[in-house]
Every structure is written in C-alpha cells, then in structure tokens.
Amino acid sequence: MEGEGKMLNIAVAGLGRMGKRHVSTLQARVDRARVVAVCSAAPHEVEWARNNPDYIDFGIKTYDSYEEMLNHAGLQAVWISTSTDVHASQTIQAVEKGLHVLCEKPLSTKLDEVETIIQAAQARPDLKVMAGFSRRFDASYRDAHAKVAAHTIGEPYLIRSNTCDLLDETGFFVQYARRNGGIFVDCTIHDIDLALWFMDNPKPKSCFAVGTLKHHPELAESNDVDNGVGIVEFYGGKIAYFYSSRTQSHGHDVCTEVTGTQGKVMVNVIPKSNNVVLADKLGMRHEVQPEYWQRFEDAFATEAAEFVDSVLNNKPVPVALDTGYMVMKIGRALQESLLTGRVVRFDEQGNRIEDR
Amino acid sequence: MEGEGKMLNIAVAGLGRMGKRHVSTLQARVDRARVVAVCSAAPHEVEWARNNPDYIDFGIKTYDSYEEMLNHAGLQAVWISTSTDVHASQTIQAVEKGLHVLCEKPLSTKLDEVETIIQAAQARPDLKVMAGFSRRFDASYRDAHAKVAAHTIGEPYLIRSNTCDLLDETGFFVQYARRNGGIFVDCTIHDIDLALWFMDNPKPKSCFAVGTLKHHPELAESNDVDNGVGIVEFYGGKIAYFYSSRTQSHGHDVCTEVTGTQGKVMVNVIPKSNNVVLADKLGMRHEVQPEYWQRFEDAFATEAAEFVDSVLNNKPVPVALDTGYMVMKIGRALQESLLTGRVVRFDEQGNRIEDR
Amino acid sequence: MEGEGKMLNIAVAGLGRMGKRHVSTLQARVDRARVVAVCSAAPHEVEWARNNPDYIDFGIKTYDSYEEMLNHAGLQAVWISTSTDVHASQTIQAVEKGLHVLCEKPLSTKLDEVETIIQAAQARPDLKVMAGFSRRFDASYRDAHAKVAAHTIGEPYLIRSNTCDLLDETGFFVQYARRNGGIFVDCTIHDIDLALWFMDNPKPKSCFAVGTLKHHPELAESNDVDNGVGIVEFYGGKIAYFYSSRTQSHGHDVCTEVTGTQGKVMVNVIPKSNNVVLADKLGMRHEVQPEYWQRFEDAFATEAAEFVDSVLNNKPVPVALDTGYMVMKIGRALQESLLTGRVVRFDEQGNRIEDR
Amino acid sequence: MEGEGKMLNIAVAGLGRMGKRHVSTLQARVDRARVVAVCSAAPHEVEWARNNPDYIDFGIKTYDSYEEMLNHAGLQAVWISTSTDVHASQTIQAVEKGLHVLCEKPLSTKLDEVETIIQAAQARPDLKVMAGFSRRFDASYRDAHAKVAAHTIGEPYLIRSNTCDLLDETGFFVQYARRNGGIFVDCTIHDIDLALWFMDNPKPKSCFAVGTLKHHPELAESNDVDNGVGIVEFYGGKIAYFYSSRTQSHGHDVCTEVTGTQGKVMVNVIPKSNNVVLADKLGMRHEVQPEYWQRFEDAFATEAAEFVDSVLNNKPVPVALDTGYMVMKIGRALQESLLTGRVVRFDEQGNRIEDR
C-alpha cells in the first residue's frame, strides 16, 4: 500500500456525538491517519456504525468491547472519547497494551486517578500519551499566545476567560451533567488551562467561587450551578477570573482577555459564526456559533494532526500530560469553594492551607 | 432679564480638572443654568479663574472661600467638585444655607458621613440634594437599562462591569490616589452602582476581592492595588463581578454586561473614541478614549441639565441620595476583603456576619 | 447684561423640523449665541412658536415674514433653514441688510443662483456668509481628515462615500423630494463635498451614474430615482464613487472610505446608534441611527459654535462659500448622467466637453 | 484496497503556488480523493515534486508533460491549475480523453475559447466539467446566499463587491499581471459572479469603468490599472458596482453587500484574519488576511470535495459551466470601458449596441 509505514492506524473509543466527529476529523482532515477501528458500549451506536456506508467503505471495524478493540491487528493508537468516568482506566489499559493515546479532557475528575495516568505514561516513555485541550490548537489562541510569548503586551498578569454554552432545553445537558464533576471542572477547566498557558504556569494561592441556578434546578442535586464566577489568585501577583454558564441565549460564547503590563490581547470577545452581517429593521446583527464544535472544529483537526505527527515522527506531544493535573486541582478547588462558600488556599508547594 | 425666574443660579466649588469642566458644561450645555460663582482653596486656581476672559465675560465671581461663596447674592445651588474629604461637610453646609446641591461621587468614603448627609437632606425636603453618578446619564447605559426594564433579556441576574483607566505615568494619579479610599471605592463604586441599578437593588450577601500592583508600587503604602478583581454575591441568586485597573495601555475602558434569563445586554465591550478605523500595515485599528471625560462628557451634560430641571420644576432628583450609601458599603467591603484576604459577609438586613 | 458685546444675536428662518432643531442647538449648545427671533411662512408653525414656553421664556420673537424679521432690532446674523428654493434670495436679502448668514446646504440647486450668492458675499467682505456642510464638523470626519492631512495614508486617491436614508413610508419624503433637485444633488452632494475635502479639491473629468426605483415610483415624475450609484473621475488619477439611497431598512447609513497609497481611513463603515449590543436568540445586534440628526447632532452644534465664533472674533468661516459651487456642479452632472445615460465630461478648466 | 471504487483518482496540472495548494487540499481535506499524478512544464517544479517526501510517500507520480499525465493508468479527473492561456486547450484535451475536469477560473480570457469549452463539455454529458469560482463555496457567502434565497432581504437589487489585494512589492505580481486580461477580468470576475449569483442572473444593460495607476506603472503597457471602479446596470432595475485594487496596505480585502427591498446582507465588510484583537498604545487592532488563500482556504476544500462528490455520485457540478461565459463577457466589457472611456451597452439578448 502506498505510504505504508507513514500512516498511523488509530482507533476511536466512544461513538457519542464527539466520537463520531473525531472519526470524521481523522478521515477527512488528517492525511497521515487511518481509522481502523471504533468501539462503543451502546448497542445502538454499534449498530449505527456497522451500517454506516462511510465506515464500511473505509474498512473501519466496529467493536462492542473496548478491550477487544485494543487487540485489533496493526492498531497503533487510540483516541479516547468515552464518558469521563472511564477515561483513566481506558487510558491505562491502552498504555499497558503499548498503544499511543489521545484522551479527551478531562483525564479524570479525580486527582488521584490523574496521577495514576501520569505514572503509567512515565513508565512507557516510548509511547505518546496526551490530554486533549482543544483550545491550545485553535488558530486564534495560538496567535494570541505567540503575541504574548513575543512580549507584545509586556508581562501578562491578569486573565479573564469565559466558557458559556447555549441554553439546552432538550434535557440532554442535564443528563450529561450528572457525572461531569461540576461547572468549574467541566467548563472552567479550559479557561484554567489557558490561564496556566498564557501566564507560564503560575502557582495557585487562593480560589473563590460563587454561582447561581437559573434554568436547570435539577443541578442542585449534584451540588452544581448553571452559572458560576470564580477568581484564582496566583503567587507572583497574577490573577485569573472566570465565568462559566450553561444558559446563554445567543450561542456558544468563549472569550479570553490577557492583560499585560504593556497591553492586552483579546480572543473572541465578540463571537461570530462567520463574517455575515444582516441589516434590517432590528439594526445590524450577526449570528453566534451554537456549540463548541462550530467554534473549535478546526482546532480538533489540528490537534489530531499534531498528535499523529508526534507519534509518526517521535516528537513531544503538543500538550504535556501533567498539564491536566494542575488544571483539575484548580477546577476542583473552585468547585469546593462554590459548595462551601469559603476561600480555598494553597501554599507555594501546592499544599492546602486552612482558611484563616 | 429675559427668562428671569426660569434660570438657576448655580456655583461650582472646586476648580480642579473636573470643576472647570463642570463650569463649561453648565454654561455651554444647560440653557437654564447660569454659573454665578466659583471657588477654590488653591491660590493658582483662584488666580486662573479671575483672569479667565470667559468667566469675566459671563460675570462669574471667583471666591477663595467656600463659605463666602455660599453667601453670594441670589445663589440657589452648588455643584461640589472639591476633593472627597470635604464633600460631606460642604454638602451639609450648603444644605444648611438652604441651597440645592449636586455632589460629585462619592459623598464620602466614610459610611457614617454618608449617613449624616442623608439625614441633613431629609431635614430639608424642600431642597434637591443629589449624588453624581454620571453613568446613569449616559445614553448607552440608559438604552441598556430601558431594554432590561422592558424585560428584553428576561430576569437580569449576573453583571460584569469594568472601570479601567489609562496608565498615567505623570505621577498625577499617585498623588490623587492617596485619599480616594482605594480602587474598589474609587473606581468600582461606579460598577456597583450599575449592578444595583440594573438588578433592582439586590442585597449583598458576600464580597471577595484580590488585587495586584504592577505599575504604582507607592500604592502599597495605602494598602491599595492598581488592578483589582472582586465578586459580590447578592441574595436572590444574583451575582456581580468587577475588574478595575489603573494601568491600561490602550485607554479608558469601561464596559458592562448584564446577563439575564433570556439574553444579554452589553455596553461598550469594544470601546471606540469615534467611528474612524485606520487600515494600514498593522491591520485595522481604532482609537480608544483616553479618559472618562471623553467617554462621559455628554452624560455629565445630561446630569447637569436634569439636576437643574429637578430644581426649577420641583421634580425628584434623578439619582436618589441613599443610592450612595449602599454603593459605598459594598465598595468598602471589597476593599476590606482585598486587604484581609477574607470573605466579607452580610445578612439579609445588611448586618455584617462573621466569616465561617 | 453680563457678557454684552460678546454674544451674537441671531435669528432662525424656517421652523420646519430642522429649523426648530437649530433654535435648540443655538440655545443649548452655543453659549455665545442668543436666539432673538424666528420666522416662518407657515401659519401653524408661527402659532406653535408664539405659544412655545421655551421661546417665550427666552424672549424669542416670532415673525410671519422673513423681511420683517430682518429688521429685528439688534439682529446680527441669520441661520437660513427654509426650503431650498428660497435659500438664494433670502441669503442675498440678509447680506444686503448687513447680516451674517449661515445658509443650510444647498445654497441652491441652480448653479447661476449659487454664483449670485457668491458675488453678493464678495461685495460684503465684512460679513460672514457660510454654506452649511455639517459633515465637516463631525468629530469622526475631522479625525479622519486630520489623519489624511498628516499623510497617515500617503496620497489619498480614491473615495467611496454613501448617503443612505432610512425608508420613509409616511409619504413625508415623497412630498419633500419634489423640489430637492434629485438624489445626487440632495444626498450625494455631501459625499462630493467630502471627496473634494479629502482629496484637496481635484478637478472633475468625467461623471457617470445609474439608478433604480424600488419604493417610491412617484419619483419617476421628477426624473429621479430612490437608489443611485455614481462615479466621478478627477484629473490627476483620483476617483470617487458614491451610493445614495432613500430606502434602507436599517437606518441612516452614511459611510466614507478614503484610500491612499499607504493605507485607508474608514468612517462609520459599521453604523451604530450607541455602544449597546443585544445578545439573544437572533445573535448579537446593535441599532442604527434612524436619521441624520441622531448621527450629526453634535456636528450641527459644532458648526453653529464655529460660525458664531467666526463672526464674534472675525475669523474666516470654517467652510468657504465657493465650496458649494463645485459640489453642486458635480452633483448636477451626476444627475444629468442618470437621466441621459451618457458620460458627462469636463476639461481641466471645468468646461463641458461633448461625449465622444 | 479498502474503499476501492469509492475513491476518485485525480491529477493536478500545474505546480505553481496554487497547484501545490490544491494537491495538499485534495490529500488532507478530501477523504474520497486520491492524488495520483501531477505535472508541470517548469523543470524546477518537476524536480521539487519528484523529491518531495510527501508526494513520494503517497505515491504521486510527477510528469513533465500534461499530455503524458492524461494517460496515467486509472486517472479519472484533472484539476487544471496552470496559467490562464492554456486553460481552454487543456480542458478540452482532458474532456476528449474522457476525464472529468475542474478548471480554475477563468476558463479563458477569450470569449470564443470559453464557448469552445462549453461545446466540448456538452458533447460529453457523461463527464463533469466545472469552472472554479471559489467564493461560491465559502461558508459566509453561502450563508448570505441562503438568507437572500429565503427572501430575508426582500428582492435583492443592488450589489457592491470588492476584490482588493495586498500590495505586492516583490515584482511577482507585475510578472503575473501580463497575461491575466486586466483587473476587471482577473479580479472583478469574482464579484461579477457573485452579482449574477445573488441577483439570479440578470442581463447586463450597460457597463462603465474608470481606473488609476498608483503603484505599478508597468501595467500601463498592457492598458491596465492597479485600481479600478466599475458599474454594471442590469435590465430589471438591478445594479452592481465594483472596486478592485492591487495596492492595499492592510491585506486581502474582499467584501460584498447585497441590498434588497427589505434589508441588506453584508459579507466580510470588516475583514479579520482571526478573532484576536490587540489593545495597546495605538488603540485596538486586528490583522487582515494577507492573501486570498488565507481567506478562502476552506472554500477551496469545499469546492474540491463537492467536485469529487459530483463525480463519484453523478450529481450536477455545483457551479454550471456557462456561468463562466457571462462573467467573462461583463468583465471584458468593463475592461473595454476602462480603456475607451465609453459606456459599453447590451440589448436584452446580450448583443452589443452602439453608444448613443
């Protein structure tokens, strides 16, 4: 076969909304990747895949067992896009099989599980194990980061970042929310990652958060909110503050501002789904992307391509695995503060200290 | 004289940067006001005024004593634009003389002084006594408020508001800052006022703030910062969060977002000094107002005109005096939290409760 | 009276929509002007004025005869805001009475009348006679012009400029349109003025225009259109092109782009009535000014103040009178081209040359 | 081989800047296409391709002869990306060999050659022959077109459209320009296509154009300009006007406005390379795409995918071939008007009529 040896045989675990998209991305956007297998624990997804002409045409084998899929002949890598609670065990299984892994964020909502993954990966330095933080692959965030790295705004010291979702009135979200760890763990984690990335990994000093429930009262059962605001103070005079929401009327609205001593870089402060403006009796208006997929589709393609490239050409993975640890630590501290109403504090070594 | 009896004879106390502007505003933008006197305790300002052809042509008398100015024949009202520490005493003096008063914000940085002013005003219901909160007179904020009041965004429950100043490298700001009460009292007070206005006077539950010093280390002496972020949680599931800065590179940047259950209203999220865009090798750019004057000049004119109208036609003042009290209470709580690192809490009656 | 001798006594001729606004502007925005008289030929306007408490309070005398008003004791200047067909005769009458004149654009739709005004003004160099071109007083256009004059964009050589009005479905516009000279004379005249101003008075070489009728078929009777596009080629390799419309759905939309060899300056390419954005299910939108008054109210105040200043302090008027001549010449050439379908050409001395 | 029979074997003719990009697009963005061959008449391009590891890995054969490439075993389709002067002959050769063809715009700058291509294609209805007009595949233009087709703006009757390129000071452009047919044929052709698409193929009535030379005096030799403005009047009261430039300082600036009786749709009126804004001492600015590739890269991928889909699934090509004829007819009329200074007129059957 042409190009043999220069193609990565990869499988996708999970055929939910995102799993299907990852299959398409690998097929249509990554010329060095070949999807050879998929799996799902949901019978209707398995059936859908087995009857999908695209999957058939391209010879993708569908499994109903993750473990069996790992034994697919010639398989080299797995993209894990299952539900969060099995991310850790599936990542470790794949690593133990000698497979490269790209695991969707978060690695786990439990810090000790994240540590276990990191240890497993460290034991196999020949394998590429990467946590997916799609924003780092977005062209605008990369441009912004390049500007900051080039000292265009002096020293970056303050970040505002939002992850706000379109209100979902179908009930899908509330089902999903039960095991996502809470709004600061599920949404704000992206913003925390950006804060660490743009400010060069500052150490957290204090975390405080408040929230409110406006559309999804069911979230009260899991001690969660549908709108939350949090502040993280870092050692070294750096600050990040976040807003996450599940209830926006206008669309998926993710923006970030990085303030430095000589200027400010803003990403997506006015979200637009494209460059069309409609002028009529209501004035002038543009539409907003409904979901993160429309906003970050290209970023997922870049992420996939760079993961594949890191494996094929033995380069470091573009997002270090331990990034996922600190991000989760801060996300959980904010979620705890939301619940207790108290400030969560850390010393410079990252140990918890009691509130005064 | 034409229109006699339909004109308000007003004096301006203080001839600093803003005092001079208020004189001009009253002359050039308020056809029913006649500036008859000004005063200043600074000899160079007094001299400047006495030699100012405009003041001479329009017969404005310059005093070096506030008390003497209050005795100016025919005087009906005073606009107090002196330094904050004398706002309270001067307001009370004027009221006791039977004069209407428009006092620049803040009435005082001390809550007990604010109460004294309110009591003095209540004792003279025939007089108009008003605290100046210029944003409430800005056309965009009014349009936004009208939209919220018309339920365009459903129930408003979350506000983000910034007051960010252009970095001043002349030393003027640091001099000024010594007696302004701190960044949350001096800057954020405007944003707090907006939060109360847009969310219909919710009662504060908890306040938390952090800050950093990036350009003006001298502020450490007065326990202040040059960049601060704060969150106020209100009873009823409402939240406001604020960012104030003294160190922006690009200009005076004041923006507000009001999120409701059915939409969001944004004011000045992309600040522009006018509607000019320059396209060249750097891309496309627009300029930003350097100071709040350029942003709010029209609002000050509207404020002046409405104060004059309230006196001449015996209407309620457009901003109730006690607004100034709650705003200051919250501003001081944020400043305290900044200093102590602790959450400041209130019960529903507004009494402090100890942090858990 | 205070300031006597430093105030200009001025009358406003015409009490239509704009005449009333000019009275207010002079009263409320120009501290050195005193409106002493107004006149109208329309009985209902005269009656309205005589019963207007504001006019009464400020001692404004209302005349039903322009000629009588010119004899008002102490009158120094007249702002002519009547219908275009009497602009020329009224301007000349006022000049002959020794009064300063600010005449709304256009001086006349007939070129020979414009010449007569210019001659009358030249015969009285002690008087200030000025044609009102309000855009030259707009802060954004001034900023743009200052940037061009400072060579920020190199040599300006190409201008796009639009004058587009909100669709008027009340019938008012069609009534008005009968004697306005046509769309290129009534609307585009402003854009032509801007082209001459920004490109330093280039000489026209050829003019071509087309148009269409979409909402106001009645305009066909006066050989006019409700949407027109025209190109003016100037000697020296400079070009201007224009779009004027009476039928916009979204508001009053006036924009200008000046392209130079090193960049481009854009004015109001995205029109906004203020800095409010509403985000809801339709996306994000802002409103647009409904009329030129909302867009240019401040410019009219500046124009009035500068005219008054030029009289009181004997400065040149801010817009030279003969500007009105070339602007009308080009506007009429476009209107002719629209009608004939032919290119209208001029030699470098401004004489018509036959189409090839 | 997996998926055999569901993949299109395609060759790319021409390995200039765009040819290389098309190879990459087909490889990385079109999962149903397999690039099997490329060719170039330029020895350095042939050498570059033969040593390109990507081409080698994927088994792409490089030819130095177009004719030989057409005989490549299993070849099904050709993407012609050579210089314009051979588009027609190469398209016809490929059709005669029984190959499907996607030919870059323009099919030819000569109208009779365009007719020959159309005839050749009509003789082989089993083959897909398509002219590449990339804008029709751009997501924003499609959204705008969908809105217009849904009558969102009523009847569309007026179009403004620009194709403006970044100034190229390397000399590359002037070399290229020699055989591109002139600015209205090379650039404006895209805008003409949009006008026909959005207004449902109106018939041209008159064309007029002017231009100027500001940066590339060498273009005078080929009777061309580096900035041109043109108006096309269509039968039925429709109008389009265009601006094309080779000399923009800020980037590739392509925008379109479609005005209808009930509103206006605007595409890319403020061009942005991404959603980053930088705020610093100069104000707030964003960058602009330097070239059409950055603006339309996704559109080229969509175009390629839809062409491949039309072949594999025997669907009509997404842009009808005869579109290229009328577009070129209007483009050449504008270019003629630029040269002669005269209006070029057509009757309703498309025959030239003499200027009056």
Image: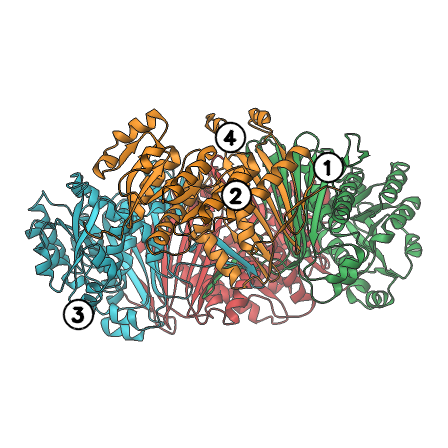
Chain colours: A orange, B green, C red, D cyan
| Residue B314 in the image, given as x and y percentages of width and height | 80, 38
Compared across the picture, whether A130 is left or right of D347 comes to: right
User: What amino acid does circle 4 point to?
Assistant: Arg
Of circles 4 and 1, which is in front? 4
Residue under numbered circle 4: A179
Mark 4: give few (<14), some (14-19) or many (20+) Cα within 10 Å.
some
User: What amino acid does circle 1 point to?
Assistant: Ser
Mark 2: give few (<14), some (14-19) or many (20+) Cα within 10 Å.
some
Of circles 4 and 2, which is in front? 2
Residue under numbered circle 2: A115
Compared across the picture, whether D76 is left or right of B220 comes to: left
Of circles 3 and 2, which is in front? 2
Viewer-closest of B96 and D27: D27
Residue under numbered circle 1: B206
Secondary structure of residue under mark 4: loop
Residue under numbered circle 3: D43
